[in-house]
Image: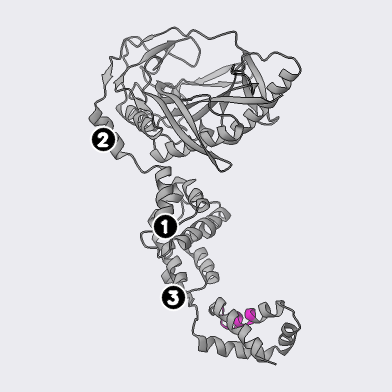
């Protein structure tokens, strides 16, 4: 029997603001527990919420980037439930009037583009964080009240690969917008997936199983793949699929039952009485749109058209916002985009990885790396010499100064190289015989000797060409 997978994804994204959604309390991830809290966050009697304008602005940016229709009338609701991580006994959210509706993004999987619809984006406040110990639970209220948006997809996703591509596309887009740091490992981007399977010929959806709090894109794919396999096996064994909540066990690479669901939970929503509706003017929305930074899709098109880079190089650059920004700084002075891209992605990234560093903390300035690239293009130094210079640049030294002080210079004078070639051939008659007898390695050896005599300064390509010509001209 053929089955189809149906996946919907809910993403909770903490917004990158200095203060919380409805209070003036600050928030940083690594602060000491319960030090970033005030009366509003703790739900003290008589304390009234005040809407964070910057959070609303960032939520609108997310709606625009993800092609949602924006409701200009901002309204909030109360979601009432009692749990230890919710100090007020209710959460302020947007159940009835989400900020944005009916959006979409395009993803690419296996060379094919697919549109994934987004049902809604609504704003709300985060809960406190619980730490479950052996016989007790500790609560850190620092996170209580942090501004969130929830991004709810339509059930258009049909595999773990598509889900991973969707979340990665969202993560990249929202990170470039700077609405969030999107760090899944720190909980600023949290993902729940709803998975069901059905017979391919059936229009009726299968029973939905929720997998909570997936903390990496790889785990999203693995959890969905496992859950699909589990549900299909259960169906074929005549078992009933129950509506339930599960978690993903990273060690066993399988989903594990948390709790059964007996139906839809009624949270008793009603309009938030302490926040009057707020009208957002069309002028403000337009101003927010005009001030938004360039998004990855637009950057990709520009890099291809302006710099002539291929898909692979562009995707490598755009995978890291800091890397893309560094490249653009390089291109203010670099004479060739492909050479600059190769130097950045291959040579510098490899060197930084070797020294347990990254592009954000390197002392090598983009203009300095461009200068190194330009010297290679001008044949002032060889690629081999450039690698040595790059090592020396790690402490922030200027490449031009290094080349001058170390005496690095590529020799492209044909007369000077020809003299060295003749010396090497005269000194190595046996290698000439080996070459004549079809031993190609002899050519490489002789070129190496020319490079050695020139102290690495001879143009390698020219030296190789002239050695071959010299060999062919001898009996």
Question: Quick one: SS at disc 1?
Answer: helix
Which comes sooner in the sequence, label 3 or label 2?
2
Task: Please determine whether, in this image, residue 140 is positioned above or below residue 377.
Answer: above
Determine the residue positioned at 43% across, 60% down: 337
The answer to whether one can see residue 140 in this image is: yes
Residue at x 37% of width, y 12% of height: 44
Give the CA distance from mark 1 to mark 2: 30 Å
* Secondary structure category for the residue under label 3: helix
- At horizontal 53% and vertical 68% (from top left) the residue drawn is 388
Q: Which of the two discs, 3 and 1, labels the residue nearer the N terminus?
A: 1
Residue with the mark numbered 1: 307
| The N terminus, quarter of image | top right
* Camera-nearest residue between 14 and 68: 68
Part of the protein shown in magenta: 447-456
* Secondary structure predominantly adopted by residues drawn in magenta: helix
What is the spatial separation of the Cα atoms under label 3 and label 2, in whole angstroms? 51 Å
Dot 3 corresponds to which residue? Answer: 404
In front of the other: 144 or 381: 381
């Amino acid at each position: 029997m053929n089955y189809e997978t149906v996946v919907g994804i809910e993403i909770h994204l903490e917004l990158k603001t200095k203060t919380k959604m409805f209070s003036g309390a600050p928030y940083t991830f690594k602060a000491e527990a319960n030090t970033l809290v005030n009366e509003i966050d703790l739900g003290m009697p008589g304390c009234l919420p005040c809407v964070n304008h910057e959070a609303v602005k960032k939520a609108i940016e997310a709606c625009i980037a993800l092609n949602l229709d924006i409701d200009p009338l901002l309204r909030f609701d109360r979601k009432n439930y009692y749990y230890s991580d919710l100090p007020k006994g209710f959460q302020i959210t947007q159940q009835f009037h989400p900020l944005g509706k009916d959006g979409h993004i395009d993803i690419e999987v296996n060379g094919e583009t697919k549109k994934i619809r987004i049902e809604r984006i609504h704003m709300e406040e985060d809960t406190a964080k619980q730490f479950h110990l052996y016989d007790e639970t500790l609560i850190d209220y620092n996170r209580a009240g942090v501004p969130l948006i929830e991004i709810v997809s339509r059930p258009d996703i049909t595999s773990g690969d598509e889900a991973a591509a969707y979340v990665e596309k969202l993560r990249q887009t929202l990170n470039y917008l700077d609405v969030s740091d999107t760090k899944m490992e720190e909980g600023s981007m949290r993902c729940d997936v709803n998975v069901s399977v059905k017979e391919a010929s059936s229009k009726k959806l299968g029973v939905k199983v929720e997998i909570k709090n997936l903390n990496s894109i790889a785990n999203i794919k693995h959890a969905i793949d496992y859950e699909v396999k589990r549900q299909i096996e259960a169906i074929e064994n005549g078992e009933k699929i129950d509506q339930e909540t599960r978690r993903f066990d990273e060690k066993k690479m399988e989903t594990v039952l948390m709790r059964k669901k007996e139906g839809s939970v009624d949270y008793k929503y009603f309009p938030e009485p302490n926040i009057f509706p707020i009208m957002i003017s069309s002028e403000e929305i337009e101003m927010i749109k005009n001030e938004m930074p360039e998004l990855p899709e637009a950057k990709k098109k520009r890099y291809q058209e302006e710099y002539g880079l291929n898909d692979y190089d562009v995707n490598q650059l755009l995978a890291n916002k800091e890397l893309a920004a560094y490249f653009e700084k390089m291109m203010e002075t670099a004479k060739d985009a492909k050479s600059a891209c190769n130097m950045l992605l291959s040579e510098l990234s490899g060197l930084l990885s070797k020294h347990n560093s990254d592009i954000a903390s390197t002392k090598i300035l983009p203009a300095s790396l461009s200068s190194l690239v330009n010297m290679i293009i001008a044949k002032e130094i060889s690629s081999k010499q450039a690698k040595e210079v790059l090592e020396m640049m790690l402490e922030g030294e200027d490449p031009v100064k290094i080349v001058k002080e170390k005496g690095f210079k590529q020799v492209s004078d044909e007369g000077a190289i020809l003299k060295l070639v003749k010396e090497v051939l005269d000194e190595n008659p046996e290698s000439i015989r080996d070459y004549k007898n079809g031993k190609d390695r002899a050519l490489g050896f002789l070129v190496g000797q020319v490079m050695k005599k020139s102290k690495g300064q001879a143009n390698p390509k020219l030296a190789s060409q002239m050695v071959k010509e010299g060999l062919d001209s001898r009996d």
